[in-house]
């Protein structure tokens, strides 16, 4: 294959060169961070430096950062580590939030996938949940949520607030204090760091119960020897995350160009969340009458990597519950793919995407003319 275009940065990002260098150097460091001898202290120093880097990136303190093995673990720790019930989550949450505990209350979203604050308040007043979880930006549509307002309403009714910021971190500014949340989930591999490293940032006043037992690591909040080299890579990526936000403007230009050109090829195609605030790199679009699995496979054969919704479903392509919660008909939701730009992408990638997507639509989907688009 002579050329490839990686347009699935919301699934995972390429590891940055300086992160690779730091990880390799950390792998040469001998010592368990829990050991008291000099080797252990050296390893501990690496972990604590990374803790400070992650905390600084989201305007928190180092003591509030709990390192985990992933964003999924961070979300589970937040929802299951608080011994309070019931729990309310938004209808567009990642499965690691939506399925973390049984019997969650669901806060609805509007047709753009934005939490309906009026309905949210009514549910809070009626059920008085002890914990609320609303993501900062949706991983499939890129739609940004009104988390600051959610936190204000929830705190006014006595609820704690968790925010899954995994997809937002590195694409928009994430400031824990400005958001006003009690807990914040992050993941390294969404910001140019390694897979297998995440963090839950927890306000010091919160009594967090560990999911894993058997050790006193992470101030007894997460047992198990720390993944030193993964944490080091996370710290380096986090330290540069806000510096790279300027590149979001370039990603937005690519996303907007792709959206405009794909819509020109298929005017009936729906862009999901189009009139809401979105992450600058994310485009969730339907190819009329052509299933997402067909699109993903055909584009892959053309050397273009995109996704059908979340990449956390064991490789399966299924109808997106996020789109269904937005009121999208199942037949349309089944035809939606996610295109997500990032560092390294150029307009050449947009050209290749448009050419391949257009050719596929001409073969399979161009016969469809919806009543609402007919003259």
Image (cartoon, rainbow, N blue to C red):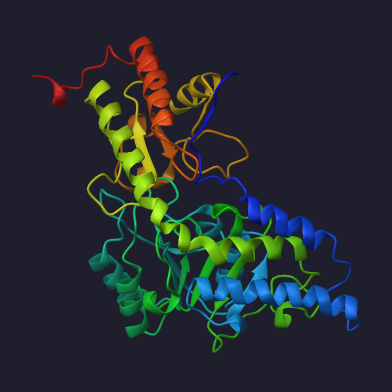
145 with respect to 34 (left or right): left
204 with respect to 248 (left or right): right
Depth check: 362 or 87 in front? 362
Residue at 57 percent of width and 78 percent of height? 82
User: Which picture quadrant has residue 348?
Assistant: top left
| Quarter of the rendering occupied by the C terminus | top left
Depth check: 14 or 159 in front? 14
Percent x, y of residue 137: 40, 57
Depth check: 24 or 80 in front? 24
Q: Is residue 34 visible?
A: no
88 with respect to 365 (left or right): right
Percent x, y of residue 357: 39, 21
| Count of numbered tags | 0
Residue at 58 percent of width and 42 percent of height? 313
The furthest residue to the left: 375
Residue at 44 percent of width and 41 percent of height? 340
Residue 125 in the image: above or below residue 303: below
Q: Is residue 173 visible?
A: yes
Percent x, y of residue 361: 35, 17
The furthest residue to the right: 37
320 with respect to 1 (left or right): left
Percent x, y of residue 212: 74, 70
| Quarter of the rendering occupied by the N terminus | top right
């Amino acid at each position: 294959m002579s050329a490839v275009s990686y347009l699935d940065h919301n699934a995972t990002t390429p590891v940055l060169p300086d992160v690779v260098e730091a990880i390799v150097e950390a792998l040469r460091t001998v010592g368990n961070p829990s050991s008291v001898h000099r080797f252990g202290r050296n390893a501990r120093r690496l972990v604590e430096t990374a803790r400070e880097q992650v905390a600084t990136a989201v305007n928190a303190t180092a003591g509030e950062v709990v390192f985990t093995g992933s964003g999924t673990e961070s979300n589970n720790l937040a929802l299951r580590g608080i011994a309070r019930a019931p729990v309310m989550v938004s209808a567009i949450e990642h499965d690691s939030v939506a399925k973390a505990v049984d019997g969650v209350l669901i806060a609805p979203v509007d047709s753009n996938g934005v939490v309906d604050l009026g309905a949210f308040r009514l549910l809070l007043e009626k059920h008085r949940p002890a914990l609320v979880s609303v993501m900062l930006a949706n991983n499939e549509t890129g739609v940004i949520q009104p988390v600051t307002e959610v936190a204000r309403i929830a705190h006014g009714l006595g609820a704690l607030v968790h925010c899954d910021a995994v997809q937002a971190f590195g694409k928009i500014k994430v400031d824990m204090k400005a958001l006003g949340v009690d807990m914040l989930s992050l993941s390294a591999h969404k910001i140019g760091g390694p897979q297998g490293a995440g963090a839950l940032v927890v306000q010091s006043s919160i009594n967090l119960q560990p999911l894993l037992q058997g050790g006193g690591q992470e101030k007894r909040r997460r047992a198990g020897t720390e993944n030193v080299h993964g944490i080091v890579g996370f710290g380096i990526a986090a330290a540069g995350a806000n510096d790279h936000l300027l590149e979001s403007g370039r990603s937005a230009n690519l996303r907007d160009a792709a959206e405009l050109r794909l819509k020109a090829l298929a005017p009936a195609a729906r862009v999901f969340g189009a009139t809401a605030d979105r992450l600058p790199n994310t485009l969730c679009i339907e190819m009329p009458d052509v299933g997402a699995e067909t699109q993903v496979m055909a584009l892959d054969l053309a050397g273009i990597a995109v996704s059908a919704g979340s990449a956390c479903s064991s490789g399966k392509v299924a109808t997106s519950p996020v789109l269904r919660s937005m009121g999208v008909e199942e037949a349309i939701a089944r035809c939606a793919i996610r295109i997500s730009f990032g560092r390294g992408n150029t307009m050449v990638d947009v050209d290749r995407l448009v050419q391949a997507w257009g050719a596929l639509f001409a073969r399979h989907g161009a016969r469809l003319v919806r009543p609402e688009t007919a003259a």
